[in-house]
Image (cartoon, coloured by chain):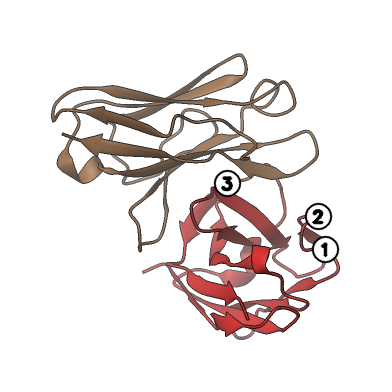
Amino acid sequence: QSALTQPASVSGSPGQSITISCTGTSSDIGIYSYVSWYQHHPGKAPKLMIYDVNNRPSGVSNRFSGSKSGNTASLTISGLQTEDEADYYCSSYTITNTRVFGGGTKLTVL
Amino acid sequence: EVQLLESGGGLVQPGGSLSLSCAASGFTFSSYAMTWVRQAPGKGLECVSSISGSGDNTNYADSVKGRFTISRDNSKNTLYLQMNGLRAEDTAVYYCAKDLRYKWNPTDTFDIWGQGTMVTVSS
């Protein structure tokens, strides 16, 4: 069982918006703004999409945005495109000085 | 181009040893902490071990402490993971990942990942 809880799957149609949630506790997401989101196409290297809750690395589309409320972080993808179909993982720094991940969410673009 | 390339994975018997390498290119290797992250089949990601840019600081997940050793050779731009006393539960794809900003700060995130190398522990 992963430290952070994500839905196993979400889906949307091209052009729509979807949101993936990531629920932690008051020992991680609830007290730190060190939440990251990664996109992973199986067989390829994971890609950093969001860091420090809502910051995008250079080169990442502004269709990707992050937020946090209480113990839950969220990744929103607007204007869904077929190439967005992938697995998405959240991560957070924790009170035990470690970094933990969610179990991953499979995004299907219908 | 910034790149990480893992190697050394394979099939090993329980109790055996394996050494993984991660060759880095395209950035000043010694300026960044590095981490090994693994993903067991059908499971989520897990940080296995991290090392500071200088190599002076390391940490390990409780699940591998005393069995795995992380190291780096900054002259060769290479990260290593020596795995001893391997167990079936160590079966996973092992990724090396670069910290975004710091030589050593566990709050940091991973901005570059390799494609991974598969380790299978089975008799």
Left or right: where A75 falls relative to B85: left
Pinpoint the chain carrying mark 3.
Answer: B
**Element marked by disc 3:** loop
Tell me the quadrant of the picture where the C terminus of chain A can be found. Answer: top left
Q: Position of residue B26 (x, y in %)?
A: 44, 71
| Shade representing chain A | brown
Left or right: where does residue A83 sit relative to residue A20? left
Q: Nearer the viewer's eye, disc 2 or disc 3? A: 2
* Residue B121 sits in quarter: bottom right
Please determine whether, in this image, residue A2 is positioned above or below residue B105. Answer: above
State the CA–CA distance, disc 2 to disc 3.
20 Å
For disc 1, the neighbor class at 10 Å (few under 14, some 14 to 19, many from 20) is few
Of the residues shown, which amino acid type is indicated by label 1? Answer: Lys
Residue A66 sits in which quadrant? top left
Residue position for label 2:
B62
Residues at marks 2 and 3 touching, judged by CB atoms closer than 8 Å: no
Same chain shared by disc 2 and disc 3? yes
Determine whether, in the image, residue A28 is placed left or right of residue A97. Answer: left
